[in-house]
Amino acid sequence: MDKSVMVVGIDDSDHSLYALEWTLEHFFSTAPGKSPFKLVVVHAKPSATTAVGLTGPGAAEVLPYVERDLKIIAARVMEKSKEICAAKSVKDVIVEAVEGDPRNALCDAVDKHNATVLVVGSHGYGAIKRAVLGSVSDYCAHHAHCSVLIVKKPRKTAH
Amino acid sequence: MAEEQKRMKLLVAVDESEGSLYALRWAIDHLFGLEQAAVTLVNVQPIFQPFIYPAGPVVYATPAVIDSVKKAQEQNAAAILARALRICKEKEIKAETLILQGDAKDKICEAAEELHVDLLVIGSRGLGTIKRALLGSVSNYCVHHVNCPVLVVKPPPKLAHQ
């Protein structure tokens, strides 16, 4: 029987790793090996030019270093995701890195793998930060061609 | 062996739209271990304001009118939840129902918080569907404001074109 595909979007933040763990805990660990989902973990690696956003004479020199750093971060993120999956005994996993804007990269990954669910974390930015920084989870909730699960890390509020 | 795993609490928001019932069916089909989960179905009825007439004379509704509207709403909510419960029963899922009054988006978020649910399931577009809109206003609001994970279920492309 064809398994349905679940795409989990990961970046360098705690929130997305929490989202991955939450997903594994609630969707996969109750019966390891019997889960109806196939898991695809996608890391959208920003390209050096978007990360730096510099134009001008100095940019060309900085780019190789930034690119190298981004590659190191991406590798670390992918390692971490593989560790988390292994810790929950989830074997049927593909981990991939895609270059570019995470919003489009995740929606494209959904189309490419014909996913039934897209899981993203959420930084929990307020309205103003969202407007300035943009929100990947927001964009995906609107534009992905499949159902979207947005996992929020519980805020530790002191009441 | 570990003690029985904490049961997952689910809140599913339903209204008259096909989208929300599809969301319920989708959740039941795809989510795992729902037989052990505590599922609550919630339907929010708008509060009837007897005197909003933007132009023209202000008319106060008589108690009889208010009563009959209230009754109609109760029947409406009961019918929606009955359909939802039937879907749950078909798949042998035990569910509880909750009827709330007020603004749908606020009430759903409140309910999710008060019940400390692990997951809120909501359809992407409900009744006020502007065809161009990618995400309805209630689901959009809930995605931003609720404290727990949210699953927004999109209708299959065929349904979306109706």
Image (cartoon, coloured by chain):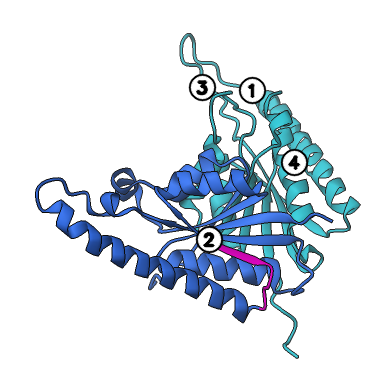
B140 to B12, vertically: above or below = above
* Secondary element at tag 3: loop
Mark 4 or 1: in front is 4
Asked whether the viewer can see residue B16, the reply is no
- Which of B44/A119 is in front? A119
Task: Check the residue under mark 3 and report the chain it is in.
Answer: B
Q: Which mark is residue A96?
A: 2
> Could you tell which of marks 4 and 1 lies nearer the N-terminus?
4
* Secondary element at tag 1: loop
Callout 3 and callout 2 share a chain: no
Question: What x and y, as percent, mark residue A44?
Answer: 44, 55
Task: Check the residue under mark 2 and report the chain it is in.
Answer: A
Image hue for chain B:
cyan
- Which of A32/A113 is in front? A113
Quarter of the N terminus of chain B within the rendering: bottom right
- Residue B63: image quadrant is top right
Query: Rounded to the nearest whole Å, what is the CA distance between mark 4 and mark 1?
Result: 38 Å
Report the residue marked by disc 3: B52
Region in magenta: A89-95
Q: Residues within 10 Å of mark 3 (few under 14, many from 20)?
A: few
In the displayed structure image, the side of residue A20 where residue B67 appears, left or right: right
Quarter of the C terminus of chain B within the rendering: top right
Residue shown at 82% from the left, 65% from the top: B35
Query: Rounded to the nearest whole Å, what is the CA distance between mark 1 and mark 2?
Result: 64 Å
Image hue for chain A:
blue
Query: Rounded to the nearest whole Å, what is the CA distance between mark 3 and mark 1?
Result: 14 Å
Q: Residues within 10 Å of mark 4 (few under 14, many from 20)?
A: many
In the displayed structure image, the side of residue A66 where residue B86 appears, left or right: right
Q: Which mark is residue B62?
A: 1
